[in-house]
Amino acid sequence: MMTRQANTERDAVAWAQFWEDEGSDAHVVNSEADAQALRAVWRPFLEGGLSSGGRCRILDVACGNAVVAEQAVSIAAEHGGAQHAICCDYSEAAVRAAVRRLDGASVSGIVADAARLPVPDQSLDIVVSQYGVEYAGATAFAELARVVAPGGAVQAIVHRVGGVIDRRCQDDEALLLATLDSGVFKSFMTLLKIRHKAAQAGLEPAAAKPASARFARSVERVETARDAAGLGAARSHVARLLTDLGRVATNPLAYRLDEMEQWVEGQRHALRGFANRMQSMSRAARDEGQVAILADFFREGGLSGVSVASFDPAHHRLSAGWILRGHR
């Protein structure tokens, strides 16, 4: 069994790879309806802190691609207020992307663990986190409370055990692991090597027929797992992978073996990283009892009006998370 520290380090590597290579929020925001539902939750909270038009200091914790900070900056501009947004994430690549996203606004970035924010006590007017701070553990919620200034407020949207995102992550993880375990990469490389050797020996492509059949069977295993999976990001990823494998397998002599070996290893690495991210999202999810403990950290940090609500977008049958709020 992996320790909490080992899980945290593995998760950090997986998410750093994600933000370096991809940097989208497709695992969470699967449609425009998802994005609209999230914006609808954030708008009244942000309006409450920004409508006065005064100076406002905003912290987006575990910011990812900073969609919440971006919405806050936009609302502040609507009311003519001065604001400064701080985007904080464990991933340096995410922070760089967030600052670029908010180009033109008053913004700064911090690379830090959400459980140890390098921010003075009670120094921020609005503190937000969307599907992020929970990855740092329960004590990170005490940090959120610590940095809220008098008159300020905090809101966090948190992953929920058994919710639509948790289920999607489990489906995606199962498909990714099934693909890795299918033998498709091994049979693919075996086929390519046999075809290259046959060509060098002047043999007909039919010499690779058994290897071709093994590759076809492994592809069928992946297709079966793909068809059983939900319509998540992993399904699209695996579909593209199968298309690429099939294109090379139909004309293997057009590709160098050493380049294909490097490509296959890169694809394996990408699938493992993707699966690790799905596992980390499931580990971050909280049930009703666990989210009550998170709310207690807000109260112990001196916040008032602490509440927990279920985030239930109308277009989903299942809940999409928890909404925690508090103010000082």
Image: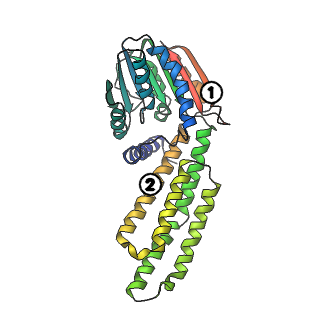
Q: Which callout, 2 or 1, points at the residue further toward the start of the chain?
A: 2
Q: Amino acid at mark 1?
A: Ser
- Picture quarter containing residue 200? bottom left
Q: Position of residue 66 (x, y in %)?
A: 42, 32
Against 90, residue 156 (above or below) is above
**Residue drawn at x 50%, y 63% as measured from the top left:** 243
Q: Position of residue 233 (x, y in %)?
A: 53, 48
- Picture quarter containing residue 307? top right
Q: Position of residue 151 (x, y in %)?
A: 45, 10
- Picture quarter containing residue 82? top left
Can residue 145 be seen at all in this image of the molecule? yes
Numbered-mark total: 2
Alpha carbons under labels 2 and 1: distance apart = 33 Å
Q: Position of residue 218 (x, y in %)?
A: 57, 68
Q: Amino acid at mark 2?
A: Ala
Give the secondary structure at mark 2.
Answer: helix
186 or 2, nearer to the observer? 186
Against 59, residue 217 (above or below) is below
Q: Callout 2 environment at 10 Å: few (<14), some (14 to 19), or many (20+)?
A: some
Give the secondary structure at mark 1.
Answer: strand
User: Which residue extends farthest right?
Assistant: 317
Q: Which mark is residue 244?
A: none
Against 206, residue 253 (above or below) is above
| Contact check, label 2 and label 1, Cβ < 8 Å | no
134 or 166, nearer to the observer? 166
Q: Callout 1 environment at 10 Å: few (<14), some (14 to 19), or many (20+)?
A: some
Q: Which mark is residue 270?
A: 2
By what rule are the colours in the image chosen?
A: rainbow
Can residue 123 be seen at all in this image of the molecule? no
292 or 209, nearer to the observer? 209
Q: Which mark is residue 310?
A: 1
Q: Is residue 147 left or right of residue 299?
A: left
